[in-house]
Amino acid sequence: MTHRPSLASAALASGLVAAGAHAAGSDTIRIGLVGTGGRGTQDLINCAKSAPGVEIRALGDLFKDRVDGCFGRLKQDQGITDRFKVTPDRCFHGWDNYKAVIECVDLVLLCQPPGFRPLHMRAAIEAGKHVFAEKPVAVDPAGVRHVIETARMADEKKLAILAGTQTRHQADAVETIRRIADGAIGKIRSGACYFLTGELWHHDRKPEWSEMEYQCRNWYYFTWLSGDHIVEQHVHQHDLLNWALQATPVKCVGTGGRQTRTAPQWGHIWDHFAVEYEYPGGVRIMSLCRQANNAANRVDTVLVGSKGVAYPARGEITGANAWKYAQEVPDPSVAEHKALIESIRAGKPINDGKRIAETSLTSVMGRMAAYTGRELSWKWAMESSKLDLAPPKYEFGPVPVPPVAIPGQTELI
Amino acid sequence: MRKHSSKPSATEVSRRDFLKGSAAASAAVLVSGVASHVAHAAGSDTIKVGLIGCGGRGGGAIRDFLSAAKNLNANVKVVAFGDLWLDRAKGTMGGLKNDNNFKDRVDCTDERCFGGFDNHDKVLAAGVDAIVTAAPPGFRAIHFPAAIAAGKHVFMEKPVCVDPWGYRENLKAAEEADKKKLTVVAGTQRRHSKCYQATMEQIHNGAIGKLTGGQFYWMGGPVTHNRGRGKDMSDVEWQVSNWYAWCWTCGDHIVEQHVHNLDIMLWAFKGPPEKCVAVGGRQTREEPGNVWDHFAVEYEFPGGVRCASYCSHWPKGAGRVSERVVGEKGTSNCAGNISGDKGWGYKGEDPNHYVVEHEDFIKSILGTGPHYNEGKQVTESTMAAVMGRMAAYTGREISWKWVTQTSKLKLGPEKYEFGPYQPEPVAIPGKTELI
């Protein structure tokens, strides 16, 4: 399977920078995808196209039909014909698919449901492979701490971890944040962020599926897999907040519930959250998210300063230093991969691991505050919370259906 | 005029001066056939008061009112009691008559205790100068305009409406009160706190610079009305007896309770917001009813200034009932503290504003203090809460202009009588219609 010394073994043997060894040997970067859903497949295409000399080598998913489907689609994709080097024997499925994919590649794109991310990231870094990790990277504090440790290991091994928070690579947002840091809106005094959108997909239950299979196929609607939509989706805005404020929240309080999406097909996640994050210096930011049809749509982040207001995702500042980003904005979902590949080739691998773990905890603590109705501190969530949503065993079979969280009843763990 | 055996105090002299002046000044008003208080002032200085709504808050409000009268040594008599249920009117009267603190200021018998949906009309016709109204919020936009039409001074508990229809009724009544020079004080008691007043003065004088945002909270435990349904009890009777549980009687807790905090928002920003977007739901309540148990609203003011509002009725939840205004140069809790460039703390006294609001009410009627007509102010604050609820219930973004001018929403049965009535089901955003 391995056609040349893996980056890990080269690095381990010589003590050299892994990426350096790679760069010295061959210019080709072999990539593979774990989690062949819509997001992952697009990530894979974007990564392959982002730079020359990137080859798609392997695909993996929990489900055979999914990985086969992805293989079929990518094979037909004219845009990546010269980069698509996957053979049927490098399509893997089952619980260990990630291990097989990791073996085949230099850079693995980890795009299975978020609940698996800590496990997969650790395996990739332990195997000496670079990582692209879709956001979020954890669904509970245990996972967050695990990823932070993985990130530390990646630093030691000079391996890249790039997170799929593509706004960090969106030119107008980058420039807005730079201006905020330069004082364009003065001191940040308050703000708001929103992810108010509609309902998503669902897969009808099939008689041959075990409950575990049902949950994994409908992963979005189970907190142990998705983190709930405040974590899975709204994490983008939380990342922007942490970025703009150059901090993580001190504490939060939240509300929310399951008001519109109440049928059993939607698992047990909620459909709306409202969280107040308090950052150092008493800066309080309102975070609203909802997945409901026929309701107001709004996806935005607003930072209110003493001298103006910034909208990073729009590349806009109003007030004393009014400004609007005028140039073209390259697709950030491609730009992030370009930056990743460049960093690997330059021997200076990007390691976003700790940052994306902290961003994920920002969203996770908001969910925990809302589920329980309690006010939470960052310190407690990061250091003391014992919440670990992972099932005792990854295997198909009967598993409990978690109850819908009820504040006042749902325990703070 | 009031007879005193002892020498009148300076205050009383000034009040006498007022009464004299008022009688003269009001001649013109009398010609136009309004303002019973003027007759009151000219004839006797006993303020005759009726209580409408003899539940827990009504009993509390009338005691606060009488405590205020005592503090001011004002000659006040409660002469009529009204409630949907006659026995409750009589019960509240009986309780006061048995209360040594207040019995000398109660001059009422069973004949002036009234029940039924028209109890307020009967109280208004019972020779009162003023009313204290604390019936469930859904009735306020009927009781308040009726009292103003009858030329009575009004102390009304908050909130004062549950829908845009009630907002418009109240605004008309507030204008009429202005014309009739009637006193209107609302139970948004923070407006009568010396501490809040002093802080708001600081804020309005620029202590924290231009306002850039704010946060307003009423996160607390549940208020639960879950009285059993008696035999032969109609829908309406059962619903009103559990008024907190139903939107048409209560307005939902964002309106009924959180209005206090939103009132501070409107005070600080000197007016209502331009628009709002909101989320919320009913996640923990198990009792019958259609109110929710949590809301979060973003109110947007001119210039894109955003305020966050959070309210919840959750057991064992985070408790937070407060206000916070953020400016360019500092932050204030609106209640005695300003932090930032110009730090400041209120050092004065802050007498119980549940009583002070009634002192201000009485002094306004007597002319011994500033004149109050809080009708518009409390109606606007209530409407801000109603607008937040409507945005949350429907999931839609709503503008102040639309909700006050165009919305056709009017809650409750067509006719107020004990009978069948099926309120709207629990609101579902995206399904609940924006009316």
Image: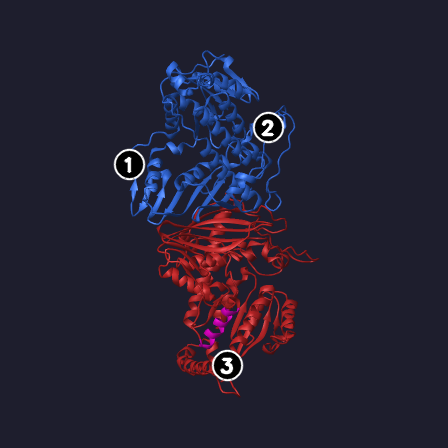
Chain colours: A blue, B red
Q: Chain of mark 2?
A: A
Q: Counting residues from the N terminus, which is met first, the one under dot 1 or under dot 2?
A: 2
Amino acid beneath label 3: Asp
Q: Which residue is mark 2?
A: A214
Name the spot of residue A25 as percent of width and height, x first.
39, 14
Q: For this view, does A229 lie left or right of residue B113? A: left
Measured along the vertical axis of the image, is residue A151 above or below residue B269? above
The answer to whether residue A268 of the structure is visible from this angle is yes
Q: What stretch of residues is rendered in magenta?
A: B355-368
Q: Secondary structure at mark 2?
A: helix
Amino acid beneath label 1: Ala
Q: Secondary structure at mark 3?
A: loop
Q: For this view, does A66 lie left or right of residue A191? A: right
Instruction: For marks 1 and 2, give the CA distance.
Output: 47 Å
Name the spot of residue A41 as percent of width and height, x first.
46, 23
Q: Which residue is mark 1?
A: A326
Query: In the depicted view, which residue is nearer to us: A169 or B91?
Result: A169
